[in-house]
Image (tube, helix red, strand yellow):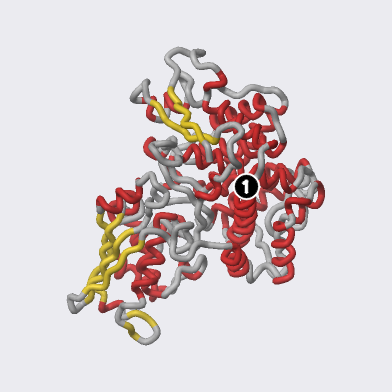
Amino acid sequence: MTATIHTVQVEKTSGDLARDQQLAWKLAELATRAKDAPQDDEAVAMAKNRIIDNAAIALGAANESAVRVARADALGSKGTGNATIWGLEDKFAPVPAAFANAVGVRFLDNDDCYLAAEYSHPDDNISPIIAVGQQLGVSGADILRGIVVAYEVHVALVGTGDGTGICLHKHKVDHMTHIAAGTAAGISSMLGLSTEQTYHAINFAVHNAISSRQSRKGDIGAQKEFVPGFSAEISIKAVHHAMHGLKGPNPVYEGVDSIIRRFLNGRDDENAAYKVELAEPGADALRNIMKTYPKQHAFEYQGQAIIDLALQLREQLPKKGDGVDLDQIEKIVLETSHHTHHVIGTDAQDPQKVDPDSPRGTLDHSIMFAIARCIQTGEFHKDRAYQMTPAEKDELRAMMARIETQFDQRWEDLYHDQDPNVQAYGGRMIVTLADGSEVADEKTRANAHPGGDTPWQRPDYEAKLADYTKDLVSDGERARFIAAVDGMDSISGDELATINLIVDAGTLETPETQGIY
């Protein structure tokens, strides 16, 4: 793909920077011209895969507390719009539907990822795009284009190599900021808005999508799952207001009181600059979605390869009955990158990360838990991994105490390598046994990664859908849904309601508390 590196730098004086040189305008131009540009067949096919993945993980979490609450919040809008909610036959207003779906998709921490200068889950963009598309009766092809554009913008902001991307987490800013930009651009492109409208939609969305990363620290609660819902709400309203000719705050990235100047590198250095790689006008079709990777395991992405590695090493450990003789494991050392060591490893110095009684939102960010659970059970299933008996918890607590992560510069260099064919988020694991012998191996990428041992194809997404919805959805309904997604290119209007998977073999639960709504 032909691309240009766009430099993003704070204005010296308010009004210095011409609008057509602002990042938000460049993103708007990309979104606008996509309407008349050729679509990449592989990118469109991947967008369909990710819609199927959204259905799987949203319904896989359908009866979790936060998801039940978000879905119930939307019930008051039943019959007032054309948007659907995963599992339900009714139609709803687009904002509450998008919110409910986005929370469902995010809950299991099992949606797709892309990691570079920033962290991201690009499929957080899908729920609001589908909801608005259904509401306004656009074509299925328009929705797919919107998703591809959202991924294009989101990935570009996260970084595509050679020092590009805008890092948010360094300054403890949540990555919702980049989600909102991608969603606003994707919806605008789907609706065929002008560059002017799209520019203001992005300005509105990005400005209102700043929040701290405290939602991902300490006793992690529902805010972590709600972030994409808030982003969806902000972005839909941003586009709606821009369609009315209202102007968003600008320049949202480069202004003297902008995001970069007050929250990011510009806070300490007024000359700070970022670089963002964008496809050129008239260039090849957009393909950033192909750089993103699915999650096989319901766990933070930096743990995906480690989980695969732990399951692989388990086969070489001493056995006891049908399992592993845990008493024969003296200690386990994982040599890995700074992030894995510092954020989800022992250097986090977070006692909750080695306590099996911690909430799921903490355990799915503890590599000690993931390693111990894989060796204990021989699998890492989205439900069973987190469903433990008291005896299993006692075993886990003892085993997690024998696991240590260590920073290793080699894995740090691989983590930050700008070549996507080299970049890796893995580690080397050494298991020391009671007799002093060692079992060791390493893995650079998760098996499901595009560059992994078994890169995911359509059958893998369909198998995940079957597994995650087996107690809720019939085989016939799943087959109907997959066929509808495959045929999206030629549907529009009321037919878009078919892009929804209905619960017809189980029950969707409601919250125990009434609340305000």
Q: Position of residue 385 (x, y in %)?
A: 46, 68
Q: Position of residue 51 (x, y in %)?
A: 63, 54
Label 1: how many Cα within 10 Å (few below 14, some 14–19, many 20+): some
Residue located at (66% from left, 46% from top) = 98
Q: Position of residue 460 (x, y in %)?
A: 57, 65
Q: Is residue 381 left or right of residue 197?
A: left
Q: Quadrant of residue 370?
A: bottom left
For residue 277, above or below residue 318: above
For residue 61, above or below residue 35: below
Q: Is residue 480 left or right of residue 11?
A: right
Front in this rendered view, residue 375 or 508? 375
Residue located at (51% from left, 13% from top) = 15
The residue sitting at the bottom extreme is 321
Residue located at (60% from left, 39% from top) = 183
Front in this rendered view, residue 249 or 149? 149
Q: Quadrant of residue 27?
A: top right
Amino acid type, callout 1: Asp
Residue located at (45% from left, 59% from top) = 299
Q: Is residue 182 left or right of residue 415?
A: right
- Residue that numbered label 1 is attached to: 40
The residue sitting at the right extreme is 494
Q: Quadrant of residue 395?
A: bottom left
Taking the image as drawn, is residue 105 in sight?
yes
Front in this rendered view, residue 335 or 163? 163
Please tell me whether mark 1 sits on a helix, a strand or a loop.
Answer: loop
Q: Position of residue 154 (x, y in %)?
A: 53, 40
